[in-house]
Image: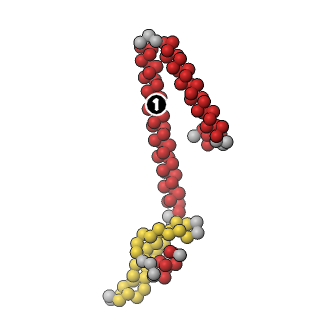
Amino acid sequence: GRLRDVLTGSRGGTDQMLLARDRVLVANRMPAVVRGETVGAVVTLRDRTELEGVLRELDGVRSLAHALRAQAHEFSNKLHTVAGLIELGRADEAVRFITRTALVHQELVDLVHERIGDPALAAL
């Protein structure tokens, strides 16, 4: 495979991503030159498996943070709606809005819990 090609010299270069079994490796192969003559090569392999996992986890956290920002913005908009209705003296309409919003939220929570069997995962 590609790892063998780097080790044997049929493939050279820097920072080549390779998959070796379940590991992600970065390979570099550079010629070893003595007095202008190539006498061999130096190959370095760096294991990037954990870094790749951390990067995937970071991407998930970023997505979650984005979703939380959107949810906070939506909640703020709803609070402004309630405040506006109360300021206009339409308290009954504000109560109906709150009740509808709570019902829709609960339906969504129930749907998530129904589709995702693990309660800890559904809570996210």
- Which quadrant is the C terminus positioned in? top right
Q: Residue at x 64, y 40 (%)?
A: 115
When the figure is inspected, residue 58 is found, relative to residue 42, above or below; the finding is above
The quadrant in which residue 114 appears is top right
Is residue 35 among the parts visible in the rendering? yes
Residue visible at 46% across and 74% down?
44
Left or right for 72, reference 120? left
Q: Where is residue 48 in the image (x, y as percent from the top left)?
A: 50, 64
Q: How many numbered marks appear? A: 1
Q: Residue at x 48, y 82 (%)?
A: 8
Q: Which residue, given by chain and number where applicable, does mark 1 sit on?
A: 74
Give the colouring mode of the picture. secondary structure
Q: Based on the displayed image, in which of its 4 quarters is residue 103 positioned? A: top right
Question: Is disc 1 placed on a helix, strand or loop?
Answer: helix
Of residues 10 and 33, which is closer to you in this image?
10
Residue located 46% across and 12% down the image = 90
Outermost residue toward the left in this view: 36
Where is residue 33, by image quadrant?
Answer: bottom left
| Visible residue check, residue 120 | no
Relative image position of residue 57 (x, y in whole percent): 52, 52
Judge from the rendering whether residue 7 lies leftward or rightward of residue 109; answer left or right.
left
- Can you give x and y, in whole percent of width and height, for residue 35 in the image? 33, 89
Dot 1: few (<14), some (14–19), or many (≥20) neighbours within 10 Å? few
| Amino acid bearing label 1 | Glu
Q: Position of residue 19 (x, y in %)?
A: 53, 68
Query: In this view, which residue lies farthest toward the top?
Result: 89
- Relative vertical location of residue 78 with respect to residue 114 in this rendering, above or below: above
Image: 45 above or below 54:
below
